[in-house]
């Protein structure tokens, strides 16, 4: 993973459909925000940036390599899960163990801290589909933060969270912005609002 830790993710002349065409962006280490007020394109865009699906036109590259090829070669370097996708019969504790095996930079202390701060202890052994939308979102965020993945993509991080949970999210993202200077992580976060409490490297408003 060392050879890609200091390089950027690049979208060139990207097109998804009539909603997004000839789109260019560069994502360096740190936190980047994509603002999509109408929720028109951010979900598919994140999937393309994560290498989960191809664009209709253009390219996404990471370290000079097509993102889909990069993800096939180094799946441990990418953390992405569509929060709207259905969950299998897996508990947060089981999922965390799977992620710890997948991501070499996984931090168990960070996972435990986020579980504690988001009051997830009582939900750790329930199936994910039995949890509330807010609890599932907290599990996803805790896992993203703990994964250590060099490229981490998150959709709608504040959705279904209460005020105290949002405050903690802002706090840990602020801390992560500082840590990115050492660990080189690239965060791409998409949301319907600007989240001004977070020290973003850049905020890009989608058409």
Image: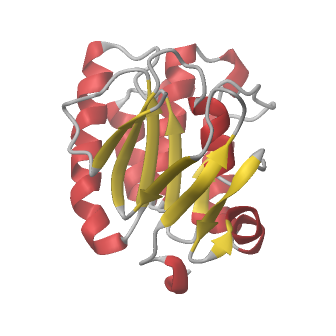
30 vs 190, left or right, is left
**Residue 196 visible in image:** yes
The N terminus lies in quadrant: bottom right
Residue furthest front as drawn:
22
Q: Residue, x 22% and y 46% (percent of image)?
A: 174
Residue 161: image quadrant is top left
Q: Where is residue 24 in the image (x, y as percent from the top left)?
A: 51, 52
30 vs 37, left or right, is left
Q: Residue, x 80% and y 30% (percent of image)?
A: 89
67 above or below 3?
A: above
52 above or below 117?
A: below
166 above or below 92?
A: above
Q: Nearer the viewer, residue 45 or 123?
A: 45
Q: Residue, x 67% and y 75% (percent of image)?
A: 65
Q: Nearer the viewer, residue 54 or 116?
A: 54
Q: Which of 34 and 138 is in front in this view?
A: 34
Q: Where is residue 154 in the image (x, y as percent from the top left)?
A: 51, 39
Q: Where is residue 202 in the image (x, y as percent from the top left)?
A: 30, 47
**Residue 149 visible in image:** no
Q: Position of residue 54 (x, y in %)?
A: 78, 50
Identify the colour scheme used: secondary structure
Q: Which of 48 and 99 is in front in this view?
A: 48
Q: Residue, x 62% and y 66% (percent of image)?
A: 61
């Amino acid at each position: 993973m060392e050879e890609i830790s200091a390089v950027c993710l690049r979208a060139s002349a990207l097109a998804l459909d009539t909603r997004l065409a000839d789109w260019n962006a560069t994502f360096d280490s740190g936190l980047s925000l994509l603002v999509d007020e109408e929720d028109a394109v951010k979900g598919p865009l994140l999937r393309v940036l994560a290498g989960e699906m191809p664009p209709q036109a253009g390219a996404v590259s990471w370290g000079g390599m097509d993102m889909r090829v990069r993800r096939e070669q180094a799946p441990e370097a990418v953390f992405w899960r569509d929060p709207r996708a259905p969950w299998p019969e897996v508990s947060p504790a089981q999922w965390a163990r799977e992620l710890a095996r997948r991501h070499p930079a996984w931090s168990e202390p960070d996972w435990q801290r986020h579980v504690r701060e988001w009051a997830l202890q009582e939900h750790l052994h329930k199936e994910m589909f039995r949890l509330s939308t807010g609890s599932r979102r907290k599990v996803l965020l805790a896992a993203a933060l703990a994964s250590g993945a060099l490229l981490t993509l998150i959709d709608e991080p504040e959705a279904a969270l209460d005020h105290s949970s949002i405050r903690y999210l802002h706090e840990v993202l602020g801390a992560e912005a500082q840590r990115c200077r050492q660990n080189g992580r690239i965060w791409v976060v998409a949301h319907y609002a600007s989240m001004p409490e977070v020290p973003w490297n850049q905020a890009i408003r989608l058409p």
